Amino acid sequence: MTAKIPPSSSKRDRRAAQLLLALSVTLLLTFTLLPQEGRRDTNLVPMSRTAAVARAVLESPQPSAHPAFRYFLVQVVGNILAFLPIGASLAVLLRRGGVGSTLLRALAAGTLLSLTIELVQLALPTRATDIDDLILNTFGTLLGALVGLAWAQRGSLRMGS
């Protein structure tokens, strides 16, 4: 039996999710599509670079002093965090049916946004394309969608009390 999601708790929650999505996508597109010096690079081998950097930083006696720490923050943490608000807002806005179908819709939309960005970056001579970004952005979307479902559930419980 699939858990049903109660209808949207309020127009205010939907408006807040719409605003969050608009702001997040605007910032994301601005940050990911502006030219960067010397960034032309393409990585199509999933998690090869990121796993090596993460391992080196995390195994270091002083991770924050490791030369690759900044790269780790931007590549791993930054890509996940960038898509958290997108996943949260999508889960609130795309709620229909069960939890699984809402998660799937939010995940598909977030993944499609990330894929679109990576494909546009591939065509830009001043940007890098990395399959790891797609993977980490999708993970961020999933985490955000779980937060969004909790946000929506909180509103539904509050309305029922």
Image: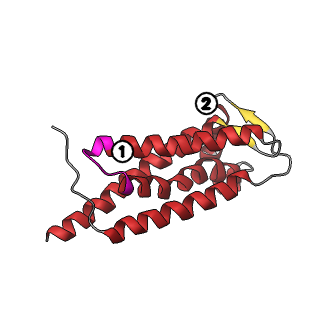
Give residue 127's position: percent from left, percent from top: 77, 45
Mark count: 2
The reply to whether dot 2 and dot 1 touch (C-beta < 8 Å) is no
Residue at the spot of label 2: 46
Decide whether residue 67 is among the magenta residues.
no
* Residue closest to the far right: 38
Q: Amino acid at mark 1?
A: Leu
Query: What residue is at 21 percent from the left and 70 percent from the top?
Result: 158
Lower sequence index among marks 2 and 1: 2
Q: Which mark is residue 142?
A: none
Numbered disc 2: secondary structure: loop
Numbered disc 1: secondary structure: helix
Query: What residue is at 42 percent from the left and 56 percent from the top?
Result: 88
Say whether residue 61 is visible.
no
Q: Amino acid at mark 2?
A: Pro
Nearest the eye: 86 or 12: 12
Decide whether residue 99 is among the magenta residues.
yes
Q: Is residue 57 left or right of residue 146?
A: right
Span shown in magenta: 93-101
Nearest the eye: 14 or 156: 14
Say whether residue 21 is visible.
yes
Give the class, few, some or many, for how many residues have Cα within 10 Å of label 1's Cα (few <14, many ≥20): many
Q: Is residue 14 left or right of residue 53?
A: left
Q: Where does the N terminus fall, quadrant-wise?
A: top left
Q: What separation in Å lies between label 2 and label 1 (alpha carbons)? A: 23 Å
Q: Where does the C terminus fall, quadrant-wise?
A: bottom left
Query: What residue is at 35 percent from the left and 67 percent from the top?
Result: 13
Residue at the spot of label 1: 103
Q: Quadrant of residue 56?
A: top right
